[in-house]
Amino acid sequence: MLPTILALFLACTLGLVSAHGGLSNYTVGDTWYRGYDPSTAEEEQVGQPWMVQRQWRTIDPIFDAESKFMACNDPGVSVGKGYIDVEAGEEITAVYYYWLHPVGPMTVWLAFCEEDCTTLDVNKVGWFKIWEAGLLEGNLAEGMWYQKQFQRWDGSPGLWPVRIPKSLKEGLYLIRHEILSIHVEDKPQFYMECASLNVTTGGKGMPGKEWLKRFPGVYKRDDPSIKINIYTEEAMRTTNYTIPGGPVWTAE
Ligand SMILES: *[C@@H]1O[C@H](CO)[C@@H](O)[C@H](O)[C@H]1NC(C)=O
Ligand SMILES: *[C@@H]1O[C@H](CO)[C@@H](O)[C@H](O)[C@H]1NC(C)=O
Ligand SMILES: *[C@@H]1O[C@H](CO)[C@@H](O)[C@H](O)[C@H]1NC(C)=O
Ligand SMILES: [Cu+2]
C-alpha cells in the first residue's frame, strides 16, 4: 500500500467520527435555505415553517444499499413546510460543512410531489437522476474523483452546484443529494439528504416511466460498483467506474 492510501485507510477505519458529514444548507442565487442540523435540538427545528429539508438524525452513513433509509436518510420524515424556490435551468448549490471523504460517486435525483412534498412517501415515489459525477481521471485507488475535488481539509464548506434541467415541468419536487463513499473495503457508506423544491417557470419535460427508480430497489448490495475494494492490484489498473443507478435523465 502506498503511504497516502494507507493514511486515508486508517483515518477512515479507526472511527474518526468527524470524518462523516451531510448537506447543511442550500443556496439559489443569493438566497440561503437552512437544512436540518442533527447537532441542534430537534424541538428548535421540527415544525418550523422555514424547514425545507427532511430530517436526518446523525451524520453517520447508511451502510445497507437496500435499506428503506436509502431514500432520504434516517428517519427521512418531513418536519417542516418550507420549499426552495428555483427556476428550471437555474443552479442550486448544496453546502456541506466538512466533507472529508475522497472516493466514490455523487448523484442528484428528483421525485415529483404532485400537490405536496411533505406528505410524499419517499419509498414509493419514482426518482429520476438529473446529475452524476464519479471518477474523473486515473485509477480507482489513486485517481481524481469529483468527490476528492469536493472535499475540504481546510474547514471551508464544500459547495456542490447542480443545474435543474431547463425543460423540466414546473411544480413541486423532492431533491435528493447522494454521496457514496467507497474508501473502506467492501463497506460502502451512503450519505443522502432530501429537500422540497418549488420549480417555477419550467418547460414541458417529465421523464417517462422507464426513468423512474425506487429507493430501496435501484441499488443491489452486491453491485460491483457498491461492494468494492479499491485497494487491490486490479483496482490500481482500473480506470473506469460505473456509477450505480442508471443514466441521467436527458430532458428533451
Ligand atoms: C446553514 O446550516 C447551519 C447548520 O444547519 C445553520 O446553523 C446555519 O444557520 C445555516 N446558514 C444559513 C445561512 O442558512
Ligand atoms: C410555488 O411557486 C409558485 C410561483 O411562485 C407559487 O404560486 C406557489 O404558491 C409556490 N408553492 C409552494 C408550495 O410554495
Ligand atoms: C469497468 O468496465 C468493465 C467493462 O465494461 C466492467 O466490467 C467493470 O465492472 C467496470 N468497472 C467498474 C469499477 O465500474
Ligand atoms: Cu465518514
Image (tube, rainbow, N blue to C red):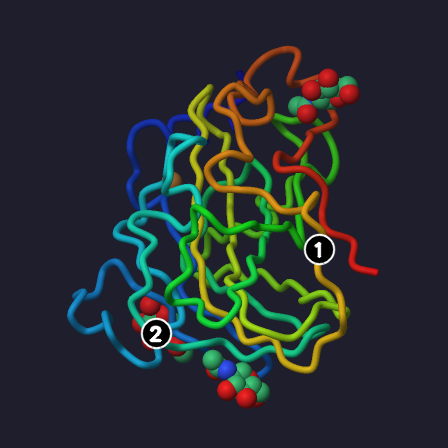
Residue placed under numbered mark 1 in the picture: 207
Which label sits in the foreground, 2 or 1? 1
- Label 1: element kind: loop
241 or 173: nearer the viewer: 173
Tell me where residue 66 appears, x and y as whole percent.
Answer: 43, 31
Mark 1 residue type: Pro
Residue at (62%, 64%) from the top-left corner? 161
Mark 2 residue type: Met
- Quarter residue 165 falls in: bottom right
Residue at (74%, 26%) from the top-left corner? 239
16 or 72: nearer the viewer: 72
Residue furthest top as drawn:
233
Label 2 lies in ligand 1 vicinity (Cβ under 8 Å): no
Tell me where residue 82 appears, x and y as whole percent.
Answer: 40, 77
Tell me where residue 39 appears, x and y as whole percent.
Answer: 23, 60
Residue placed under numbered mark 2 in the picture: 51
Give the Cα distance between marks 2 and 1. Answer: 28 Å
| Residue 31 visible to the viewer | no
If you read the primary sequence from the N terminus, does the residue marked by circle 2 or circle 1 appear first? Answer: 2
Location of residue 127 with respect to 171 vertically, above or below: above
50 or 7: nearer the viewer: 50
Residue at (30%, 28%) from the top-left corner? 14
Q: Is residue 28 left or right of residue 12?
A: right
Location of residue 226 with respect to 80 vertically, above or below: above
Q: Quadrant of the C terminus?
A: bottom right
Q: Is residue 167 left or right of residue 151?
A: right
Location of residue 161 with respect to 227 vertically, above or below: below
